[in-house]
Image (spheres, rainbow, N blue to C red):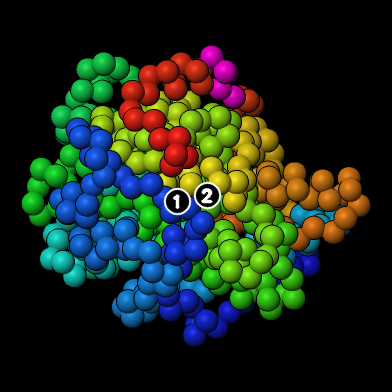
């Protein structure tokens, strides 16, 4: 099988993270105090995050230096490879050139350590003893467990119940790196007990797990909270992916027409696309940036743009986002990392301003794409990554129909070695096509009682 691997040298690992806020035509709206609906300042975030991360969260500086110790740890797996997918191109009989950036070579098997290591570093610098967090499919929890182990921090992870049951080896990865893993909703927290009282069989959601992890942080002075997506500083840390990809595409002698990544809360998509957006903003390029979400949780394509909580109980500040409502519980799809009700403020503003695109893919189409990819490229993708592959195939088929060359780049954000139960369900015919009805969408949105975005701001 012919395959082109585009590599970089260790010295080509980025030395700075890119902050897209600096170049956005419209800056993201501020978070609000849930009680007063007034903008909050950095001090409101102090119970949750170390000050260095709070400063990054509100920064409008274009470049943020990567601490040398973080960059040294990055060398364990960065720079990550890029491949030209000749096998997939041949299978599709397309004139398109398809490239993928492969983040599955990290210790945790995904892109998540790019921010987990940074967040653990800043917490250690501030003297924090323990970090609490949530995880959907387990990739973020695995990455954070690994990072906390590196810096001698305790780690407590609330894992969405349905994923806890579906993906036992992710739990064992976290245990191996020293983390305590609790299925969410749990009896450990007041938030969890409240959810279980209303629905003892709740499959959980990322919103619920966030509530539990946040509660643990605000009630324990030795514990801070870490989030694997959504927030500005998290998305910024992931831009090492896109920066490397630009250099690799230059070595390949091409520039992508479209950049594609799966979408849960935004870190995956932002990591690859934001550096290419910088080229649009500052160099006049017209690279399309496409976020791909599941039809079971379509906040970008069918949600509303308004203020909402990042968690299910309502413990976080109100964030401007595309949302289905903070108490929305998605279906039990296997792409656990994409089962989140809302989108990060940066991505939401960019989508509202028509600077990026979004589409939704059903889980059957996504697994069909993942299996086709695996049989022609050799790598078994994570269920989340399958969504990007499905969209890349759509783009390649359009190029074939139009008879035009199209350069496609997507983020293969992680391998599926610990997600084989999802493939087993697919091959045995147990997976079903699932798309929310308009009535489901209307019902979910009707329950949102948080402030709307002012028309002048929107």
Q: Which quarter of the picture shows residue 188?
A: top left
Establish if 55 lies above or below 303.
Answer: below
Q: Main secondary structure of the magenta part?
A: loop
Q: Secondary structure at mark 2?
A: helix
Residue 81 percent coordinates (x, y): 59, 70
Pointer 1: what residue? 346
- Which residue was labeled with disc 2? 350
Q: Are marks 1 and 2 in contact (CB under 8 Å)?
A: yes
Residue 413 position by quadrant: bottom right
Query: What stretch of residues is rendered in magenta?
Result: 435-439
Q: Residue at x 22, y 17 (%)?
A: 197
Mark 1 secondary-structure assignment: helix
Question: Along the horizontal axis of the image, is 292 left or right of 116?
Answer: right
Q: Nearer the viewer, residue 129 or 109?
A: 129
- Residue 130 on image: x %, y %: 17, 56
- Any magenta on residue 304? no
CA distance for labels 1 and 2: 6 Å
Residue extending farthest left? 221
Give the class, few, some or many, for how many residues have Cα within 10 Å of label 2's Cα (few <14, many ≥20): some
Q: Please state the horizontal and vertical placement of residue 436, each as a whole percent of the image.
A: 56, 22
Residue at the right extreme? 403
* Residue 164 placement, left or right of 443: left
User: Where does the N terminus fall, quadrant-wise?
Assistant: bottom right
Residue reaching furthest to the front: 456
Residue appearing at x 23%, y 47% in the figure:
40
Seen at 26% across and 68% down, the residue is 121
Against 166, residue 152 (above or below) is below
């Amino acid at each position: 099988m012919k395959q082109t691997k585009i590599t970089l040298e260790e010295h080509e690992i980025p030395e700075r993270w890119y902050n897209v806020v600096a170049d956005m035509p419209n800056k993201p709206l501020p978070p609000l105090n849930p009680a007063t609906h007034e903008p909050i300042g950095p001090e409101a975030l102090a119970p949750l995050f170390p000050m260095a991360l709070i400063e990054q969260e509100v920064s409008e500086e274009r470049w943020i230096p990567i601490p040398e110790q973080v960059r040294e740890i990055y060398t364990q797996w960065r720079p990550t490879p890029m491949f030209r997918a000749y096998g997939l191109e041949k299978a599709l009989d397309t004139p398109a050139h398809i490239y993928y950036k492969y983040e599955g070579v990290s210790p945790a098997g995904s892109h998540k350590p790019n921010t987990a290591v940074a967040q653990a570093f800043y917490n250690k610098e501030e003297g924090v003893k323990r970090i609490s967090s949530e995880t959907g499919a387990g990739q973020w929890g695995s990455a954070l467990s690994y990072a906390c182990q590196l810096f001698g921090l305790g780690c407590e992870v609330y894992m969405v119940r349905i994923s806890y049951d579906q993906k036992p080896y992710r739990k064992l990865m976290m245990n191996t790196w020293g983390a305590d893993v609790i299925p969410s909703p749990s009896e450990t927290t007041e938030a969890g007990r409240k959810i279980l009282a209303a629905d003892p069989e709740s499959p959980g959601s990322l919103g619920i797990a966030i509530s539990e992890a946040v509660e643990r942080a605000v009630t324990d002075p030795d514990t801070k909270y870490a989030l694997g997506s959504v927030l500005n500083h998290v998305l910024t840390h992931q831009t090492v992916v896109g920066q490397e990809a630009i250099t690799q595409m230059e070595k390949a002698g091409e520039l992508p027409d479209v950049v594609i990544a799966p979408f849960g809360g935004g870190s995956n998509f932002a990591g690859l696309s934001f550096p290419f957006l910088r080229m649009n903003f500052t160099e006049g390029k017209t690279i399309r940036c496409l976020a791909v979400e599941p039809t079971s949780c379509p906040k970008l394509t069918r949600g509303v743009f308004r203020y909402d909580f990042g968690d299910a109980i309502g413990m976080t500040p109100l964030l401007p986002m595309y949302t289905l409502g903070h108490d929305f519980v998605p279906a039990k799809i296997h792409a656990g990392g994409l089962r989140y009700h809302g989108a990060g403020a940066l991505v939401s503003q960019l989508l509202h301003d028509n600077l990026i695109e979004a589409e939704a893919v059903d889980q059957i189409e996504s697994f069909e794409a993942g299996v086709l990819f695996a049989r022609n490229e050799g790598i078994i993708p994570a269920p989340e990554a399958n969504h990007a592959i499905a969209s890349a195939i759509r783009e390649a088929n359009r190029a074939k129909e139009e008879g035009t060359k199209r350069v496609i780049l997507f983020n293969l954000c992680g391998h599926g070695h610990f997600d084989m139960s999802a493939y087993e369900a697919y091959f045995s015919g147990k997976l079903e096509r699932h798309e929310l009805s308009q009535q489901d969408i209307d019902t979910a949105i009707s329950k949102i009682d948080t402030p709307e975005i002012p028309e002048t701001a929107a």
